[in-house]
Image (cartoon, helix red, strand yellow):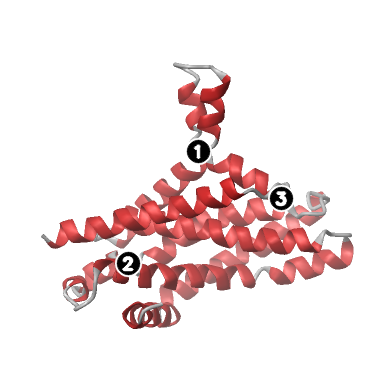
């Protein structure tokens, strides 16, 4: 990490802990996480060794949490009038975007770490495949990285924080739940085309990871999704600046 990227990362990461909004969002997230977890335990949904239902729940909560955190990255700066000053700093736009991205990605990782207590509780009640559970935590963090990048890119032009949240949420939901295979099948139902469309399906890769079927293609998919979003964010900043 270059010195300038680290400076941006440090500034943004510290600002999360100084924001009342972030603490409020974290409290709401914790409430829903705990209540949903105990509800799943009561209903007996946590009966698999990989805690698949738990990680599905975590992904759904992260879809709500990450857009809430991304408000601080662009829209809040525009609202307070510091955006022009930020992009005028003697730093490349790519470094600026990367520093902000790392801040929200690390923050999402800390949020995931806070849920490990539930894992330990369930491990005392059920026989779990702890290695797979640990792997799922890591890969879910990778997935959160792609959602962080999408959330940043989708809100770069928005000034109003509420609008920023809504737009980021919409793009994250679209990325996760849109199935390109449903559209492709209307025009071509061949097996080759179907396989190609499934390779671009977020849920297919996520379900493969939960099942323990880790493949380089799934990891490459989520990393590529995040990289494309970050590049788009960088280009948008340059265009906005002009």
Task: Tell me which residue sits at (77%, 54%) in the image.
Answer: 50
Identify residue for label 1.
Answer: 200
Q: Which residue is mark 2?
A: 97
Q: Is residue 227 visible?
A: yes
Instruction: Give the x, y percent position of residue 104.
Output: 44, 69
Alpha carbons under labels 2 and 3: distance apart:
33 Å
As helix, strand or loop, the secondary structure at mark 1 comes to loop
Residues under numbered marks 1 and 3 in contact, where contact means CB atoms less than 8 Å apart: no
Disc 1 to disc 2, C-alpha distance: 25 Å
Query: Is residue 223 placed above or below 199 in the rendered structure?
Result: below
Q: Secondary structure at mark 2?
A: helix
Residue 35 locus on image (x, y percent): 68, 61
Sequence-wise first label, 1 or 3:
3
Q: Nearer the viewer, mark 2 or mark 3?
A: 2
- Nearer the observer: mark 1 or 3; the answer is 1
Among the 4 quarters of the image, the one containing residue 87: bottom left
Residue in the image at 79% along x and 56% along y:
41
Image position of 222 (left or right of 19): right
The image's mark for residue 164 is none
Name the residue nearer the viewer: 176 or 57.
176
Q: Is residue 155 visible?
A: no
Task: Determine the image quadrant of residue 110.
Answer: bottom right
Q: Which mark is residue 53?
A: 3
Would you say the residues marked 1 and 2 are in contact, meaning their CB atoms lie under 8 Å apart?
Answer: no
Q: Are marks 2 and 3 in contact (CB under 8 Å)?
A: no
- Distance of label 1 from label 3 (alpha carbons): 23 Å
């Amino acid at each position: 990490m270059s010195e300038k990227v680290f400076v941006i990362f440090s500034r943004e990461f510290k600002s999360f802990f100084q924001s009342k909004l972030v603490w409020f969002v974290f409290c709401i997230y914790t409430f829903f996480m705990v209540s949903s977890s105990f509800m799943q335990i009561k209903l007996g949904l946590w009966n698999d060794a990989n805690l698949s239902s738990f990680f599905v729940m975590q992904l759904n909560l992260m879809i709500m949490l990450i857009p809430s955190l991304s408000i601080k990255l662009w829209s809040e700066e525009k609202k307070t009038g510091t955006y022009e000053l930020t992009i005028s700093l003697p730093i490349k736009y790519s470094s600026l975007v990367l520093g902000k991205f790392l801040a929200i990605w690390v923050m999402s990782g800390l949020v995931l770490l806070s849920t490990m207590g539930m894992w330990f509780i369930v491990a005392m009640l059920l026989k779990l495949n702890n290695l797979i559970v640990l792997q799922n935590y890591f890969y879910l963090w990778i997935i959160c990285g792609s959602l962080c990048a999408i959330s940043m890119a989708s809100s770069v032009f928005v000034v109003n924080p509420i609008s920023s949240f809504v737009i980021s949420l919409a793009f994250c939901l679209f990325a996760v739940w849109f199935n390109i295979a449903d559209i492709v099948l209307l025009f071509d139902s061949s097996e080759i085309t179907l396989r190609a469309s499934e390779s671009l399906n977020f849920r297919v890769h996520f379900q493969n990871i939960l099942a323990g079927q880790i493949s380089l293609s799934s990891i490459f998919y989520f990393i590529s999704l995040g990289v494309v979003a970050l590049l788009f964010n960088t280009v948008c900043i340059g265009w906005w600046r002009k």
